[in-house]
């Protein structure tokens, strides 16, 4: 009798393992729910200010990582383009938030003001209106 | 029950279960989150860590345990509401420095992982391109056919051009005139010729066969350089010929709500002018991938112009051919859900509209939100009018419908050069895949959603586990039974500097609690304990068949399991008989239900049901219940 009772938790653990093993840690709802119709896939929260903060951080950190590691400028531009696209922006060179995020990344990477200005000019062109947004992001820091 | 019915969530959603004596100063905190078991994905439960803006959690995707991040609102909507699982947050008190170190650690880990996945995708594109060029070189495929098999994002708004249509879009014709005035009549044609020469001369680099570490330099690839140039060729052709938008790539809904007023018209004229200026500057940009923003910008310019001319909104269809389609026949109570969705999407559209009009200059992000909101609302309206499905956007908010290029060229490589490039390209792709498997392989016991969180909590600090204990107040051994989420929840509450535990009830629990406030407990319990009479549950499209809910029944759970087992066996049998007609769906659902019911026989509760729809209001309330970390 005692043996039979001891078997129950063991069977439980075994079944848990079988269940968990078949779907363990997988995304609960990998396919889209009808609720997703109501919002964009990259709308991170219903409060768009949260989206803006998160986007700014992403651009800042991506820029920081690029300055630290170096590499092809075109790959960096494409990477920023991918981030911007998730926010609905295709032409990020004209987008204030993106350019401010790049400025913050340059500051995080400890570039001095002259180096940051040179980086921004090289990226956006000398006459771009958005250079001041990079500057603003740089001055605001993190 | 109508899906939009108000539920007194605020009273119910936040149950402070335990409050330990702690420091007087509030925050910062981190939350260790555990999610109860349920049928479906993560059926043994799930775990996550909330740090800063994000909830970080490790998900098993095709055998790889990858770090995902979501806002608290989206995480709770997925697990507590749609997944109908109780979520418990153990709020751990930390210093600002500890929070910053954890945030930096998870941020860097996420970025490196994304680069590794991108590297694998890039190597795959490279190998596929080389194989295609090799087939052309051997005469097995003609170059025009190969070009026609390519899909260029953004091109689908204009291509393929309808046969016999020689019309021009007036807005693009005007933009072309500006280009000609500024850069000369031959600028566009000459730019295209230059690009085609560049394409012919493109050569593959040796494949990037290194691993990805935080300090690994970013690298471009042969395939991506080619795609950029082809996209730019298409964009310049569209401009040069002032191609009109495809009829199936735009829509203009009927009804008075979609008419453009005088104030809007003024705003749109200004916006259209500014967008035109931006496109002129984009032609001079150094961005290698400027073809896509040119295509998207020109399509939007044409749509804005049509809106102004016609006095009625014209939108680009921002759904892509890869977007998921939800068959409405699968959804119980679809009419009520659509009605709720129509209200939500209308509200969202009004909100975006107001925000866009309030802006002083052309703001692409604001317009993109408005455009996406219009698409979503129109999609719901189409479904209400009788469409059989709803499309759900899978990717971002930029309308990037793809199409094959109308013409172009491919790089000219000799057979020997191709053969020399193809072998290493295949090896590099294989190595990248192997490295990914090695770095992220999921294991039920050794590497799972719980173990990776605690490994990260140690790795985040220079002093490793000892420093982690010092900063967080304790540690958890994530092995053996310690990898089970609810075991880890108890362990964290015992060992870590937990200030309090917040319990977010599952969607069904919250609904029942609301009913109990108005009706007798017994009546509610009797009615809501089964799927036949419950008013708080409609069978979710992902749920297998069951009769009795397993939660709140205590020692009677094996009995519940026996009833559910019988239902699941019947479903399995029906699925087996109906295999030729219904496919494997019902049969597999029955098998899943059988396994879950067997677990109920030994007191495990994994049959809770799930929901297909939660309103934005519910999402906001449940996020508010978790509250901020400061």
Image: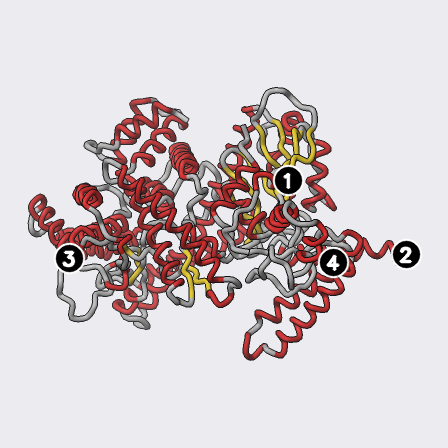
The residue singled out by tag 2 in the image is A3
Mark yes or no: residue B149 visible. Answer: yes
Contact (CB < 8 A) between labels 1 and 3? no
Image mark for residue B555: none
Between marks 3 and 2, how big is the CA–CA gap?
Answer: 82 Å
Q: Is residue B350 above or below residue A106?
A: below
Q: Which residue is the site of mark 4?
A: B600
Q: Residue furthest right?
A: A1
**Labels 4, 1: front one:** 1
**Mark 3 falls within which chain?**
B
Q: Where is residue B473? Give x, y as percent.
A: 67, 27
Q: Nearer the viewer, mark 4 or mark 2?
A: 4
Point out residue B423 in the picture as x, y percentages from the top left corner.
42, 59
Quarter of the C terminus of chain B within the rendering:
top right
Q: Are marks 1 and 2 on the same chain?
A: no
Pick out the residue farthest to the top. B24
Q: Element at badge 3? A: loop
Image depth: mark 4 or mark 3 in front? 4
Residues under labels 4 and 3: Cα distance? 64 Å
- Packing grade of label 2 (10 A; few <14, some 14-19, many >=20) is few
Could you say where residue B64 lies in the image, as x and y percent from the top left? 56, 52
The local secondary structure at tag 1 comes to: strand
- Element at badge 4? helix
In the rendered image, residues at marks 3 and 2 fall on the same chain: no
Q: Which residue is mark 3?
A: B169
**Foreground: B203 or B107?**
B107
């Amino acid at each position: 009798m005692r043996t039979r009772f001891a078997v129950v938790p063991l069977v439980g653990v075994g079944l848990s393992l079988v269940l968990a093993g078949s779907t363990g840690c997988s995304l609960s709802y990998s396919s889209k729910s009808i609720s997703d119709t109501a919002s964009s896939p990259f709308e991170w929260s219903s409060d768009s200010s949260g989206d803006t903060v998160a986007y700014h951080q992403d651009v800042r950190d991506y820029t920081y990582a690029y300055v630290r590691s170096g590499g092809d400028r075109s790959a960096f531009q494409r990477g920023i383009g991918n981030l911007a696209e998730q926010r609905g922006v295709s032409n990020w060179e004209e987008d204030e938030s993106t350019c401010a995020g790049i400025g913050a990344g340059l500051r995080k990477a400890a570039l001095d003001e002259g180096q940051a200005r040179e980086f921004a000019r090289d990226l956006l062109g000398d006459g771009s209106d958005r250079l001041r947004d990079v500057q603003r992001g740089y001055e605001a820091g993190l | 029950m109508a899906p939009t019915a108000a539920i007194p969530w605020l009273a119910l959603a936040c149950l402070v279960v335990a409050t330990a004596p702690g420091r007087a100063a509030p925050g910062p905190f981190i939350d260790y989150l555990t999610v109860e078991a349920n049928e479906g994905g993560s059926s043994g439960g799930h775990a996550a860590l909330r740090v800063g803006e994000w909830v970080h959690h490790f998900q098993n995707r095709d055998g790889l345990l990858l770090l995902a991040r979501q806002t608290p609102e989206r995480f709770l909507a997925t697990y507590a509401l749609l997944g109908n699982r109780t979520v418990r947050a153990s709020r751990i008190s930390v210093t600002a420095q500890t929070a910053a170190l954890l945030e930096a650690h998870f941020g860097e880990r996420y970025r490196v992982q994304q680069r590794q996945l991108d590297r694998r995708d890039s190597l795959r594109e490279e190998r596929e391109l080389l194989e295609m060029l090799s087939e052309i070189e051997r005469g097995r495929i003609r170059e025009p056919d190969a070009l026609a098999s390519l899909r260029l994002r953004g091109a689908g708004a204009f291509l393929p051009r309808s046969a016999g249509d020689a019309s021009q879009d007036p807005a693009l014709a005007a933009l072309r005139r500006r280009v000609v005035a500024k850069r000369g009549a031959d600028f566009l044609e000459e730019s295209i010729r230059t690009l085609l020469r560049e394409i012919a001369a493109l050569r593959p680099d040796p494949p990037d066969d290194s691993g990805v570490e935080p300090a690994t330099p970013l690298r471009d690839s042969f395939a991506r350089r080619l795609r950029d140039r082809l996209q730019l060729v298409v964009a310049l052709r569209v401009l040069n010929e002032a191609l009109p938008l495809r009829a199936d790539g735009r829509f203009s809904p009927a009804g008075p709500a979609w008419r453009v007023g005088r104030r809007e018209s003024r705003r749109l004229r200004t916006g259209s002018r500014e967008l035109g200026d931006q496109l002129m500057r984009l032609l001079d940009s150094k961005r290698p991938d400027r073809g896509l923003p040119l295509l998207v910008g020109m399509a939007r310019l044409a749509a804005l112009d049509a809106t102004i001319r016609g006095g009625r909104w014209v939108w680009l269809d921002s759904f892509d051919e890869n977007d998921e389609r939800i068959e409405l026949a699968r959804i119980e109570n679809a009419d009520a859900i659509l009605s709720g969705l129509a209200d939500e999407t209308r509200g969202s559209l009004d909100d975006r509209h107001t925000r866009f009009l309030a802006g002083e200059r052309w703001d692409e992000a604001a317009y993109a939100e408005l455009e996406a909101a219009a698409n979503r609302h129109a999609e719901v309206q189409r479904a209400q009018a009788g469409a059989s499905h709803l499309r759900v956007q899978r990717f971002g908010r930029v309308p990037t419908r793809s199409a094959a290029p109308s013409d172009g060229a491919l790089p000219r490589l000799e057979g020997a050069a191709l053969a020399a490039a193809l072998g290493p390209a295949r090896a590099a792709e294989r190595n990248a895949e192997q490295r990914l498997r090695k770095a992220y392989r999921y294991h039920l016991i050794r590497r799972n959603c719980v173990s990776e969180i605690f490994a990260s909590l140690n790795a985040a600090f220079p002093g490793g586990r000892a420093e982690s204990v010092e900063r967080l107040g304790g540690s958890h051994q994530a092995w053996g039974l310690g990898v089970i989420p609810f075991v880890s929840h108890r362990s964290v509450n015992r060992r870590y500097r937990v200030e309090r535990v917040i319990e977010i009830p599952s969607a069904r629990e919250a609904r029942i609690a609301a009913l109990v406030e108005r009706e007798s407990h017994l009546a509610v319990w009797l009615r809501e304990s089964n799927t036949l009479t419950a008013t708080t549950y409609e069978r979710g499209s992902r749920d297998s068949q069951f009769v009795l809910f397993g939660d709140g029944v205590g020692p009677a759970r094996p009995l519940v399991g026996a009833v559910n087992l019988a239902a699941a066996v019947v479903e399995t049998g029906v699925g087996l008989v109906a295999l030729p007609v219904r496919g494997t769906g019902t049969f597999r659902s029955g098998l899943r239900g059988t396994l879950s019911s067997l677990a109920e026989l030994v007191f495990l509760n994994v049959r809770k049901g799930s929901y297909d729809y939660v309103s934005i209001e519910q999402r906001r309330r449940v996020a508010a219940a978790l509250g901020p970390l400061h």
